[in-house]
Amino acid sequence: MADLLFNPITLTFLLVLFISATFTFTTIILWLVIAYFKSNLRATYFEHRDRILSTIEYTENEVPVLLGFFHPYCNAGGGGERVLWTAIRDIQRFFPYVVSVVYTGDTDASKEQILAKIKSNFDIGINPNRIVFVYLQKRYLVEDDRYPRLTLLGQSIGSLFLGYEALNNVIPDVYFDTMGYAFTYPLVYLLTGIKIAAYVHYPTISSDMLQKVQDQTSVLLKRGVYTKSTIWNMGKQVYYRSFAKIYGYCGNFADIVMVNSTWTKGHIENLWRRDADIVYPPCDTERFSELPIVERERFIASLAQFRPEKDHMLQLQSFAKLLENNPDFREGEKKTCLVLIGSSRNEGDENRIQSLRLAAKELDIEENVIFEINAPFPKLLEWVSRAKVGLHTMWNEHFGIGVVEYMAAGMIPVAHKSGGPLMDIVTEYDNQPTGFLADNVDEFAAHMKTAIDLSPEEYIAMASNARASVCDKFSELVFGDGILRSLRRSLT
């Protein structure tokens, strides 16, 4: 009997039986859990829908369509919010029967306060009778500082609970994620079966991140180095690859996928295995394009928050190389200055600014570097109307709205040769150049010299071409057409 029990064939059979039973049991439990939550949502569907619709006015003949925008940080006032509010405004114009339901965690702001801020920040008017705010109490579950380790996974799992809270308040007819919470898609699909749309600003994880970790590990292994660092990198590689697989699986549940750039499109299609439409984000080209294109002063302006990925240090190093190669740029008629314009949001930003000030002193360029911190918009406009060159050094920026603003304002861009600036923005227009691209100190220094030394005629020709390019490609009108074209089949 013992020989039969411990026979390899018998053991294999028992192992397969155990795995099958475990899988079947887990599947049944999961199905029961889904059925339970689905039943709860179904039981309150009409009650919650009527409650939402009771807050607005509509005629008995109207059949409102609820379009749910999952945007937990809707009151942040950044580029992602410009996308959100421009989309809602255009949907209100062309689909008057659609009621926009915005799921937000901004519990400290009333509907009136949010709409007033939208008008003040973006000059976008929203019809208050066609928008409802659903306030979420669990937004803390997606905040990155809550997860010092495994941040991506922690935030993604947290978004599941936040997504369920949203659905438990009201189930829309179409779910539109405008912040990149892909882990909510299978939840929405399994519990409601409604259409899912996504506007992706950047992938939560990209093949570049995976490749970077893989390259670091490969270098260590080739050297025969087996240390804590090697093991850590191998663990990171497994973590990132596993996360990418799950992220791709979740993204595949989206019915409509829109992305903000060619770079994002490539990564999303690779990970999600779905076709994505490029809908460039709306940029404030109209306000910047009102600035006159006339001969500018010898200022090189940088508009960027003082975040690590913006790589201000590369800007200082490149500018130092420019002055080293051209000593006459330090003073006199050809004196050239770098102006760093950005906001200081917290202590981390302030520490980075102090480090940059010290670096400018060590590089012996402090007399030619100006820091403009937390400048009001009129002051920002003053600088971009005076500067001749706009500098951008972030590697693989998914889009690059700052570069668009440079070009709309009449500056010659010198941008990083990667991501959105390379693929979408600093490209030829009417067979003429619109700026310069670089990816190292020497190239940045050389292109800054070329741009700053352009004759008045050369400058006006290139700046005018650059402005025409961005006004043609990145206006609110072009964005609205793209959004409406993608959503039309779900809203009609």
Image (spheres, rainbow, N blue to C red):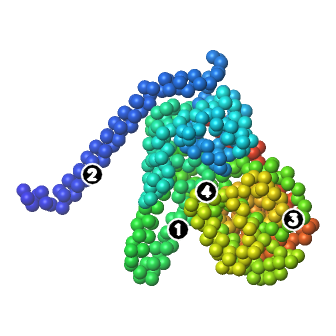
Number of other residues with Cα within 10 Å of mark 2, as a class: few under 14, some 14 to 19, many 20 or more: few
Residue 326 picture quarter: bottom right
- Label 4 amino acid? Arg
Q: Closer to us: mark 3 or mark 2?
A: 3
Residue depicted at 53% across the width and 58% down the height: 205
In the image, 159: left or right of 471?
A: left
The span from disc 3 to disc 2 (Cα, nearest Å) is 72 Å
User: For the residue marked with disc 2, what is the amino acid?
Assistant: Ile
Locate the N terminus by quadrant.
Answer: bottom left
Closer to the camera: disc 4 or disc 1? 4
Quadrant including the C terminus = top right
Do the CB atoms of the residues marked 3 and 2 lie less than 8 Å apart?
no
Q: Secondary structure at mark 2?
A: helix
The amino acid type, in three-letter code, at marker 3 is Arg
Q: Which residue is mark 4?
A: 345
Label 4 SS? loop
User: Label 1, on which residue?
Assistant: 211
Residue at mark 2: 19
Q: Nearer the viewer, mark 3 or mark 1?
A: 3
How many labels sit on residues?
Answer: 4
Q: CA distance from mark 4 to mark 2?
A: 52 Å
Pointer 3: what residue?
Answer: 296
